[in-house]
């Protein structure tokens, strides 16, 4: 009753790694507020946006949904700060990159089925999970890495998921940033994409205030980006007219925004980087996160007996330690750190 990509999606949803995303940081650590996005809610939002785009373009919605729901499975606790810290720890052991970790999870680390390790997903789903990859790493990925070595594109569904991810995190980080009070409406009025849409909302609803004003603005921004992506992608497909999937792979990226929206999107990302991601209150948590990840890695490498038994027996001990730490939720990482370093904790 299910197609192959539906089965992929279902296996992802029922995986342990997917459930852990509920307690992994998007921008704000889980304990900082119940209403901020987590990796789980972000993944669901990406899937919703990607499915809508794929339906408009006549693409495979089930493939897009599977890729969207799996794309962040490999993220460490504490968001990009955790990934950067773990990459620094693993620099002499092959490094760490969350896209590759997501693939490692679905190919090997999930232990649910009697006949195989991982989730046994289709090639197209696995390919879509790896958005970018160094040539050195690509050589170690087998069939999934070949397109990076040959300079070919992934499926159009994977290209859409990549941009749906961008639409989701940019606009929802605006929402969470305003909710947190770390950025303000006055600051955002200097950003063209936001300013244009809040002006439309205020013209139509002059008495609207607070959360409704923000939500009406953000949803219009998302709608503009989605419609532009659909129109531009459809035009690119019509222009290049690939006859089959092999021809599409030889084309330049076909899923794209118009040049005007590319620039406005870039301006929004610059604003968020400077005013939200580098806000001193966010950086304080970032600093703590890096210290927690570094301390845990150092302790486990120095004495592998501190690891759970299944991680002690690994042939590649540094990679096994990275697997263990990357699989932690924010709160579990903090709890492990207290167990190892706080006097009186067990």
Image (cartoon, rainbow, N blue to C red):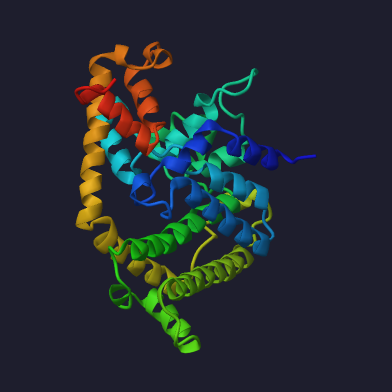
Residue in the foreground of this view, choosing between 132 and 9: 9
When the figure is inspected, residue 159 is found, relative to residue 212, above or below; the finding is above
Residue 267 in the figure: left or right of residue 146: left
Residue in the foreground of this view, choosing between 42 and 138: 42
Residue 210 in the figure: left or right of residue 125: left
When the figure is inspected, residue 112 is found, relative to residue 124, above or below; the finding is above
Locate residue 238: give its quadrant.
bottom right
Residue at screen point 47% across, 30% down:
104
Q: Position of residue 212 (x, y in %)?
A: 47, 73
Q: Residue furthest front?
A: 344
Residue in the foreground of this view, choosing between 243 and 321: 321
Q: Quadrant of the C terminus?
A: top left
Residue 34 appears in the rendering: yes
Locate residue 23: give its quadrant.
top left
Residue 167 in the figure: left or right of residue 230: left
Residue 95 appears in the rendering: no
Residue in the foreground of this view, choosing between 332 and 173: 332
Q: Quadrant of the N terminus?
A: top right
When the figure is inspected, residue 214 is found, relative to residue 100, above or below; the finding is below
Q: Position of residue 111 (x, y in %)?
A: 55, 22
Residue at screen point 23% across, 31% down:
294
Q: Position of residue 226 (x, y in %)?
A: 54, 67
Q: Position of residue 64 (x, y in %)?
A: 60, 50
Residue at screen point 55% across, 45% down:
69
Residue at screen point 56% across, 33% down:
15
Number of numbered discs visible in the structure rendering = 0
């Amino acid at each position: 009753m299910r197609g192959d990509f539906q089965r992929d999606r279902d296996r992802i949803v029922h995986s342990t790694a997917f459930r852990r995303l509920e307690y992994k940081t998007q921008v704000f650590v889980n304990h900082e507020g119940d209403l901020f996005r987590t990796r789980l809610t972000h993944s669901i939002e990406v899937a919703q946006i990607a499915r809508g785009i794929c339906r408009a373009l006549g693409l495979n919605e089930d493939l897009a949904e599977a890729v969207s729901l799996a794309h962040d499975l490999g993220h460490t606790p504490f968001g990009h700060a955790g990934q950067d810290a773990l990459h620094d720890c693993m620099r002499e052991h092959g490094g760490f990159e969350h896209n590759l970790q997501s693939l490692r999870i679905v190919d090997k680390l999930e232990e649910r089925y009697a006949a195989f390790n991982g989730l046994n997903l289709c090639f197209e789903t696995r390919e879509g999970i790896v958005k970018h990859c160094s040539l050195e790493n690509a050589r170690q990925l087998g069939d999934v890495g070949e397109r990076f070595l040959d300079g070919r594109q992934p499926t159009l569904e994977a290209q859409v998921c990549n941009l749906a991810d961008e639409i989701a995190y940019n606009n929802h980080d605006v929402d969470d940033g305003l909710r947190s009070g770390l950025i303000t409406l006055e600051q955002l009025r200097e950003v063209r994409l936001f300013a244009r849409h809040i002006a439309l909302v205020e013209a139509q609803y002059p008495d609207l205030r607070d959360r409704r004003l923000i939500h009406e603005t953000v949803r219009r921004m998302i709608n503009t980006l989605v419609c532009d992506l659909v129109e531009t992608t459809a035009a690119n497909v019509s222009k290049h007219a690939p006859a089959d999937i092999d021809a599409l792979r030889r084309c330049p990226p076909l899923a794209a925004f118009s040049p005007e929206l590319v620039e406005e999107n870039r301006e929004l990302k610059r604003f968020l980087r400077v005013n939200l991601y580098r806000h001193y209150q966010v950086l304080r948590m970032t600093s703590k996160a890096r210290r927690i990840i570094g301390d845990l890695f150092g302790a486990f490498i120095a004495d592998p007996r501190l690891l759970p038994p299944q991680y002690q027996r690994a042939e590649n001990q540094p990679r096994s330690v990275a697997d263990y730490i990357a699989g932690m939720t924010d709160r579990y990482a903090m709890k492990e750190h207290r167990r190892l370093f706080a006097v009186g904790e067990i």
